[in-house]
Image: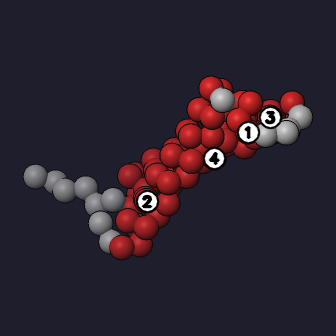
Amino acid sequence: MSRLVDMLYKSAQADKAKALLTLELLENSPAGIGDHSTTDFYKNAEEALSMLADADDRLEAIEKYLVTKQVI
């Protein structure tokens, strides 16, 4: 894997981890997030879900188009 592809892959993995952590915190510890309205809470959940879906799409695209497949 080239350095460029490696960087793109790791960036997508990091975004996926951030999104999953955010969703976990929102679900399991919403009181620890601070003074936010329910609108902020919902917005944060929607943003985290979008980040997760985007990261998964990026990882899939990298696997499909950028990672060289070896034919044996």
Residue pictured at 72% horizontal, 43% vertical: 47
Compare marks 2 and 4 and give the one earlier in the sequence. 2
**Mark 2, secondary structure of its residue:** helix
- First-in-chain label (2 vs 3): 2
What is the CA distance from the residue labelled 2 to the residue labelled 4? 14 Å
Is the C-beta separation of discs 2 and 3 under 8 Å?
Answer: no
**Mark 2 to mark 3: distance in Å?**
28 Å
Closer to the chain start, of discs 3 and 4, is: 3
Q: Amino acid at mark 4?
A: Met
Q: Which mark is residue 10?
A: 2
**Horizontal side of residue 16 vs 42, given as left or right:** left
Which residue is identified by label 3? 41
In the picture of the structure, the residue carrying the numbered disc 4 is 51
Q: Quadrant of residue 45?
A: top right
Q: Residue at x 67, y 41 (%)?
A: 48
Dot 2: within a 10 Å radius of its alpha carbon, few (fewer than 14), some, or many (20 or more) residues? few
Q: Earlier in the sequence, mark 1 or mark 2?
A: 2
Q: What residue did someone put label 1 on?
A: 33
Question: Where residue 23 sits in the image (x, y, percent)?
Answer: 63, 35
Q: Is the residue marked by circle 3 packed among few (<14), some (14-19), or many (20+) residues within 10 Å?
A: some
